[in-house]
Amino acid sequence: MSGASVVLFDLDDTLFAHRAAVALAVTAHRHNLGGTLADADDTAEVERWRLLEELHYHRYLAGEVDYLAQRRARARDFVAPFDLDLADDAHADRWFDEYRIEYERSWALHDDAIPCLEQLRAEGRRIGIITNGDLAFQQSKVKRVGLAPLVERVIASGDLGVAKPDRRIFEHACQMFGVAPADAVYVGDRLATDAIGAAEAGLIGVWLDRPRAATDAQRELAAASAVLVIDSLEALPALLAGSQ
Ligand SMILES: [Mg+2]
């Protein structure tokens, strides 16, 4: 093995196909509910739900609202254009729980996740996850999709009290593995939150640009932080072998 001994990954949309599961789940949930919600445009509603997730989940990560409050806010804002009243917390929670059943039904990994992790482990590298989320919920995902035997540790912002891109979560992960940041790699699908955040904490930052949508400005930002850019996890083992 050459290079970093520890490779840390983001979970959602890096190893785990979160966006696809969310799209399937919110569409199924709307159709289960029926009425005007079911009649709305599938593509537009997926995008609206995704933007509400981005808004309210980041308010949770910033400490502005708690975990349940962000779920309720997403549910209420989503049904606001329709004839559905979720003002009562119990109603909002039930609505979100029903969505979550559909979300969990759609859980899957990206196809390149397991082969990548298996190859890195075969090279003697140790694997971990740093995720912005609730530890128990993210661990349940890790188990269900078959990552648990490949991953040594899951570090979650909800448990630690600081979220990416705060350098303390990356430093904490390196301490848990007993390695210096320079001996660790962090791979994630968000340039600033994941790759640049990790690089600023002293790790090797890798940005996974799955949609190959990097702009020139983003490439310049990545280069300025010595962040490496890949468009598939297939490319990661060779990249790490050649990066030292
Ligand atoms: Mg992600």
Image: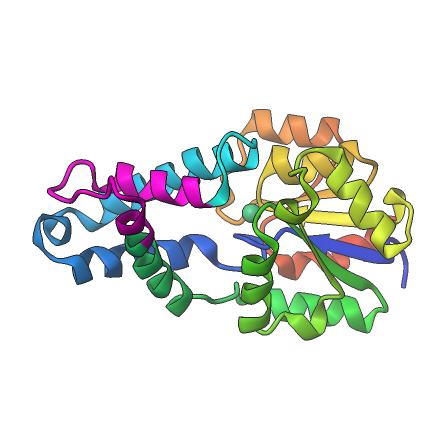
Q: Nearer the viewer, residue 91 or 195?
A: 91
For the stretch drawn in magenta, what is the main secondary structure?
A: helix
Q: Is residue 157 visible?
A: yes
- Asked if residue 121 is among those painted magenta in the image, a careful observer would answer no
x and y percentages locating residue 226 in the rendered image: 77, 34
Q: Residue at x 14, y 47 (%)?
A: 40
Q: Nearer the viewer, residue 209 or 45?
A: 45
Give, as a single range, the part of the protein colored magenta: 68-93
Q: Quadrant of residue 52?
A: top left
Q: Quadrant of residue 101?
A: bottom left
Q: Residue at x 60, y 45 (%)?
A: 132
Vertical side of 116 occupied by 207: above or below: above
Q: Is residue 16 left or right of residue 81?
A: right
Vertical side of 23 occupied by 47: above or below: above
Q: Residue at x 68, y 37 (%)?
A: 162
- Asked if residue 90 is among those painted magenta in the image, a careful observer would answer yes
**What sort of colour scheme is used for the picture?**
rainbow
x and y percentages locating residue 177 in the rendered image: 85, 56
Q: Nearer the viewer, residue 115 or 135?
A: 135
Q: How many marks?
A: 0
Q: Nearer the viewer, residue 79 or 221?
A: 79
